[in-house]
Amino acid sequence: MRIEIWADVVCGWAHIGKRRLEKALASWDGEPVEVVWRPYQIDPSAPAEAVPMAQALLDPVADEALRACSPGLSPAENRARVAEVAASEGLGAQWGSSYRAGTLEAHRLIALAYEEGGAALQDRVVERVLNAHFVEVRDISDLAVLTEIAADAGLAEAAGYTGAGPDRQTLPGAELTRELLLTGKAKGVRTSPTIVANGLALEGAQPPETIAAFLRDAAGHAPRRLPAEVERLRHAESLLDQRDPFGALTLLRPLMDAHGDDRGVRLLAARAYFGSAQLNRARTALESLVAESPPTTPTPATCWAAPCNARAATRRPPPTSPWPPP
């Protein structure tokens, strides 16, 4: 059974949840399990280069986001509370973070670790990243820190850290990480950590006994397995429903390349073009769908084509006419 942990590596509860899951699995006597970490960002607006937490808390946006994580507590009070829980889980009395750090690059390294070496290697990298952030109090957005972690795991070359001045957007695994973040959003992941197994989800760093009970329920659950292409299509549609047309197009791109003649893929792409104001592309896609099978009754394609054509017309300059009029 695959257990997915959707979590952010700057989330203290993710670190605590990792320990609690390990305790739950220590007495697990069910089927073999594979634990896979998936990316989630609790602070997607965090800067790529970290800033000290004391400075970050002066930002009203960051302060508001942190207060939303702990209603009724100030950020400082919440940090003290989480640190106390972490200490009780054996994570260290000095446990805590000192940076507001962007986590996209750390997530890329973690995703790449699974692709290169499976769950065991990924677990080692996750442990190192969490330890660096919360125990060693280092900046995990710093490429030097991540390069050190990657080198210790034998991943420096695979991660693209052996060259000078790597472009973070084109490094190996960057596109995979962006897709995984969108997939989590499409699935409805909304907190860190969220444990998913056999189509069931458990939110938060629950006690080991609660996690164990959840895993027993998941082991007895048999979700319907869909082809990967169908899953991707459904995730893209979910992103459209969440008003994220650009995310939907990102997930649709491989389907458009491999199944460009499929009407369902083309219609969803047209909707995404329309939602992202790429009206000429939307109109071209919809008109080709309508032309292939002219309907006698309204179809989804014709229903979408009408507003698309109307909006596209407003973008074109009006036709010239003689002046003054006759």
Image (cartoon, helix red, strand yellow):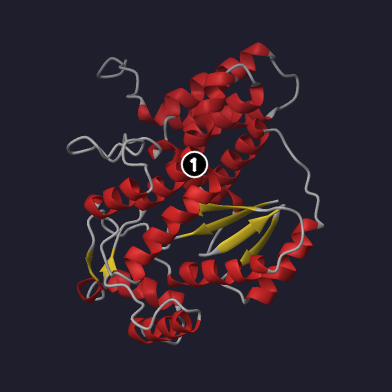
299 over 241 or under it: above or below: above
214 over 222 or under it: above or below: below
- Report how many numbered discs are placed on residues in the image: 1
Give the side of residue 317 with respect to residue 33, left or right. Answer: left
Observer able to see residue 274: no
Where residue 215 sits in the image (x, y, percent)?
Answer: 72, 63
Give the side of residue 323 with respect to residue 271, left or right. Answer: left
Residue at the (34%, 50%) spot, across then down: 152
**From the image, which quarter does the C terminus lie in?**
top left
38 over 258 or under it: above or below: below
**Toward which corner of the image does residue 21 lie, by quadrant?**
bottom right
Give the side of residue 272 with respect to residue 49, left or right. Answer: right
Residue at the (50%, 65%) spot, across then down: 192
Three-letter code, disc 1: Gly
Foreground residue among 55 and 90? 90
Observer able to see residue 324: yes
Where residue 155 sits in the image (x, y, percent)?
Answer: 36, 42
| Residue annotated with mark 1 | 117
Where residue 264 sits in the image (x, y, percent)?
Answer: 65, 27
Where residue 174 sits in the image (x, y, percent)?
Answer: 38, 39
Give the side of residue 288 with respect to residue 215, left or right. Answer: left
Residue ranking furthest to the top: 292
37 over 237 or under it: above or below: below
Residue at the (70%, 33%) spot, across then down: 227
Q: Residues within 10 Å of mark 1 (few under 14, many from 20)?
A: few
Foreground residue among 213 and 261? 213
* Dot 1: element: helix
